[in-house]
Image: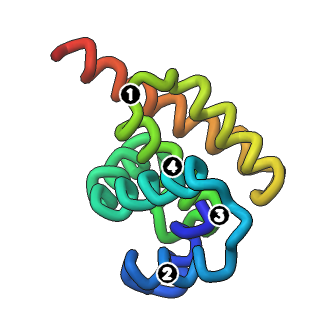
Amino acid sequence: MQMLFQADLGKQKPEQVTELFWDARDDVDDETRGFADDLFRVASEREDQIDLLIQKHAQNWRLERMAVVDRNLLRAATAEMLAYPKTPAAVVINETLEVARRYAAPESVNFLNGVLDAIGRELLAERLKL
């Protein structure tokens, strides 16, 4: 989420964000770093698809009008649901809501939960069709 936030506000290329982000952190284990890099890569490469999913399920909310933290939490969680389909959507949502309770406004939690639940249901329905 932090790399997505940095890319969103700084309008930087993914390579620049990754380099700057990890230069400031040397205490992260390889597994965590790999997972974070993978989510950031998926979110960056599939940004259009992810943003369309968010827009579709965030009724009456345009992406650019959302709080930056909320928008990027939605992007990170949606990227995780797309990249790691074996992880139950409920787990991704719960993890996202924990982060939201720390970084987002209190009223954001219900909003994020509703949007992510709808996205998770849509992605599951698509997988069941395959």
**Which of the marked residues, 3 or 2, is nearer the chain's N terminus?**
2
Label 3 SS: helix
Q: Is residue 97 above or below residue 121?
A: below
Q: Kindly identify which residue carries mark 1.
A: 85
Disc 3 marks a residue whose amino acid type is Val
**Which of the marked residues, 2 or 4, is nearer the chain's N terminus?**
2
**Which of the marked residues, 3 or 1, is nearer the chain's N terminus?**
3
* Model colouring: rainbow
Quadrant into which the N terminus falls = bottom right
> Closest to the observer: 126 or 35?
35
Label 1 SS: loop
Give coordinates of residue 127: x percent, y percent.
26, 20
**Which of the marked residues, 1 or 2, is nearer the chain's N terminus?**
2
> Closest to the observer: 118 or 41?
41
Q: Nearer the viewer, mark 4 or mark 1?
A: 4
Q: Kindly identify which residue carries mark 2.
A: 19
**Cα gap from disc 2 to disc 4, whole angstroms:** 16 Å
**Cα gap from disc 4 to disc 1, whole angstroms:** 14 Å
Label 2 SS: helix
Give coordinates of residue 80: x percent, y percent.
46, 41
Quadrant into which the C terminus falls = top left
Q: Nearer the viewer, mark 1 or mark 2?
A: 2
**Cα gap from disc 1 to disc 2, whole angstroms:** 28 Å
Quadrant of residue 73 within the rendered picture = bottom right
Q: Residue 35 shows which numbered tag?
A: 4
Q: Residue at x 41, y 34 (%)?
A: 84
Q: Residue 69 shows which numbered tag?
A: 3
**Cα gap from disc 3 to disc 1, whole angstroms:** 24 Å
**Which of the marked residues, 4 or 3, is nearer the chain's N terminus?**
4
Q: Is residue 31 above or below residue 72?
A: above
| Within-10-Å neighbours for mark 2: few <14, some 14–19, many 20+ | few
